[in-house]
Image: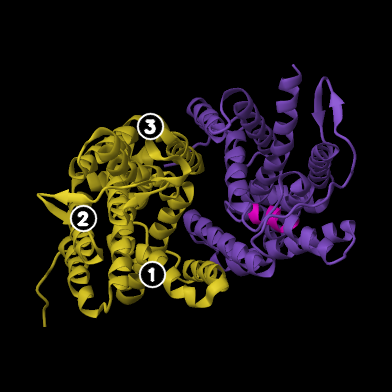
Amino acid sequence: MAQFLQYAFSGLTVGAVYALVALGFTLIYNASGVINFAQGEFVMLGGMVTVFATMAGVPLPLAALLAIAVAVLVGISLHLFAIEPAKGASAVTLIIITIGASILLRGLASVIFDKRFHALPAFVPGEPLRIGGASILPQSILVLAGAAIIVLLLWLFMSRTLMGKAMIATAANRMSARLVGINTVWIICASFAVSAAIGAVGGILVAPITLTNYDVGTLLALKGFSAAMLGGMGNPLGAIVGGLVVGLLEAFGAGYISSAYKDAIAFIVILLVLFVMPNGLFGKAGVERV
Amino acid sequence: MKMPKISQRHGVVLAILAIVLLLPFVMPSNFYFRIATLTFIFALAVLGLNLVMGYAGQVSLGHGGFFGIGAYAVAVGPVHFGIPGWAALPLGAALAGLIAFLIGRPILKLKGHYLAVATLGMGILIAMVFTNEARFTGGPDGMSVPRLVLFGWAVRGPITWYWVSGITLVIAAWLAMNLIDSPTGRAFRAIHDSEPASGVLGVDVARYKLTAFVLSAVYASIAGAFLALYDGGVTPRTADFLRSIEFVTMAVLGGLGSVIGSLVGAAFLTVLPQVLTVFHDYEHIVLGLLIILFMIFLREGIVPAIANRIFGRQR
C-alpha cells in the first residue's frame, strides 16, 4: 500500500505538469485550430528564466513573475510573427511552423542561457511528509496545488469574465463570434498568452523536482500532446484527466513493470483507449460532411 | 514551337535522374558525396511518407520506427543470426511492411490528430525496443553494422553509396509515379479529399489506406538499412521520434503530394544544417527561423508553391 501511494504521488506530480501542458495545447487549439508543438518551450522558459534570474540575484517571486512575463511575450510573438502571417495555411503547415518555432526557441535558450541542467531550490523547504507510509515532498504538494489553482482560475476566467466568454465563443465558431463583434484576432492572441503563462507556471513549479535545461520542452510537448489527445482534443477537462492519467501510468509502469519501458506503458494504454474510443476519453464524435 | 510532350510521370523521374547523374560533376570532395548520399537516403524515406501523407492524406509521426527496423535488420541479422546483409535488407523491409500491416489496420481508423498521436506512440514503442533489448541491439550505445558485400564486392565509401542510394531513389520515384498514376493512386487522392465520398463511390477506404501505409513503411525501412550500412553503425537515435518529426518536416517543407518535393525537403534539412555550421551556436536559431519563413511564404511546400508561381494556379 505504501508503495502504491508512493508511485501515485510521483505520478500525480509529473501528471500535473503534463496536464498543464495539455491544457495549454487545448486553449490554443480551441481558439485557433493550431496544434502548437512549441508548447513545451513555454515550460522550459518558465524554468530556465527563473533559474537564471535567481542566479543573477533577483528574489524568487520576482524571478518567477519575470519568467511568466517572458513566456507570455514569447507566446504573443509566436502568434503575431509566425502563426498570424500564415493565416489560412493548412493544419500541417501550421504544425511545422510551430516545430520551427520550437527549434528556434531551443536554439535561443541554448545561446542565452546554457546547455547544462539546472535546479531551483525548493520553494517550501522541509522534510518530506509521511502519508500512509509513503513520503511526499512539500514541493510536490505545491505543484499539485499550483496546478489545481491554475485550473480553478482558468475556469473562473472562462465562465465569469467577458473575455473568457469571448474565448469560448471564438472556439465554438469563429465566424459567428466575429459577427457578434468579438475581435477574434485579439482573442486568439490572448489564448496564446494565457497558454504560455500556464506552461511557464508549470515549468517554474516543477523545476526544483525534475531539473530543467534548454531541451526539456520537446518531450513535454510530446507527453502533453498525447495527454490532450487521450482526453479528447479540445476538451479542457479531458486535458487535465489525460495529463494525470499519463503521469500515473508512467509512475505505476515504472514501479511495477519496468522502468525502461515506462513510456511504453503510457503509449500502449493511449493506443488501446483510442482503438476503443477514437475521439479520446471525453471527445465528441465528429460528423464529417461530404 | 511545340515541345515534344513528356508526361509528368516521366518528367519527374527524369529530373531526379538528371540530378543524380549531374551532381558528381559539381561536387569537389567526398564530403559533398556524403551529404548528397544522406539526402538521397532521407529522400527515399520521405518519398514513402509522402505517399501516405501527401497522397492518401494520412498523418504519420511514427516513420522513424520503420526506418529503425530497416537499420537494425542489417545490424542484428548478420551479427546475431548469420544472415548476410544483402538478405537482411529485404527481410527488414518485409518485417517493417508486416508490422505496418498489423498495426495499420486498427490505427488507420483514427483520424487527423488522433492518428498522429497513435503513430507517434507506435514509433516510440518501436524505438524503445531498440533501446532496451540490449542483448540484441547493444542498447543505448547501439551496435556496429558489418559492411555490405555483394558477390564478393564490398559496398563502401561515399562515392559508391552515392550511386547506390541515387539509383535506388530514381527507381523508387519511378515506382511511386507509376503508382500515383494508377487506379490505386487515384483512390489515394480520393480518400485524401473525402473518405465518406470515396467510400460511397466504391473505394475500399480501409484497404487503400493500409496499402499506402505498408508501402511507406517498406520505403522507410530500406532507407534505414541504407543509412545503417553506409554509416557502419546504428544507435536508437537512428529511429527515435525526432527522426519521425524530421521526416514529416521534410515532407511538408518540400511539398506534400510532390515527389520532387520529397527530395527538396530532404535536401533542405540535410544540407542546410551543414551550411549553418558557420553560425556555430546560432545554428538552430537560423534553422528554426528558416523553417518558419519558408512555411509562411511557401505554405504549400517549396516545390508546389514555386510550381504554382511559375505555371499559375491549376484550379
Within-10-Å neighbours for mark 1: few <14, some 14–19, many 20+: some
The residue segment tinted magenta is A40-46
* Image location of residue A116, percent across then percent down: 66, 59
Chain-order first, disc 1 or disc 2: 2
Q: Amino acid at mark 1?
A: Val
Q: According to the rendering, which colour does chain B have?
A: yellow
From mark 3 to mark 1, how far is it between C-alphas? 34 Å
Judged by its main secondary structure, the magenta piece is helix
Q: Amino acid at mark 3?
A: Ile
Q: Which residue is mark 1?
A: B271
Q: Is residue A181 visible?
A: no
Q: Is residue A181 left or right of residue B119?
A: right
Q: According to the rendering, which colour does chain A have?
A: purple
Chain-order first, disc 3 or disc 1: 3
Q: Which residue is mark 3?
A: B103
Confirm or deny contact between disc 3 and disc 2 (CB under 8 A): no
From mark 3 to mark 2, how far is it between C-alphas? 26 Å
Residue reaching furthest to the top: A1
* Image location of residue B61, percent across then percent down: 45, 46
- Viewer-proximal residue among B60 and A12: A12
Query: Taking A267 as reference, is B249 above or below it?
Result: below
The part of the image, by quadrant, that contains residue A252 is top right
Question: Which one is in front in this view, the residue at disc 3 or the one at disc 2?
Answer: 3
Q: Which residue is mark 2?
A: B177
Tell me the SS state at disc 2. Answer: helix
Q: Is residue A239 magenta?
A: no
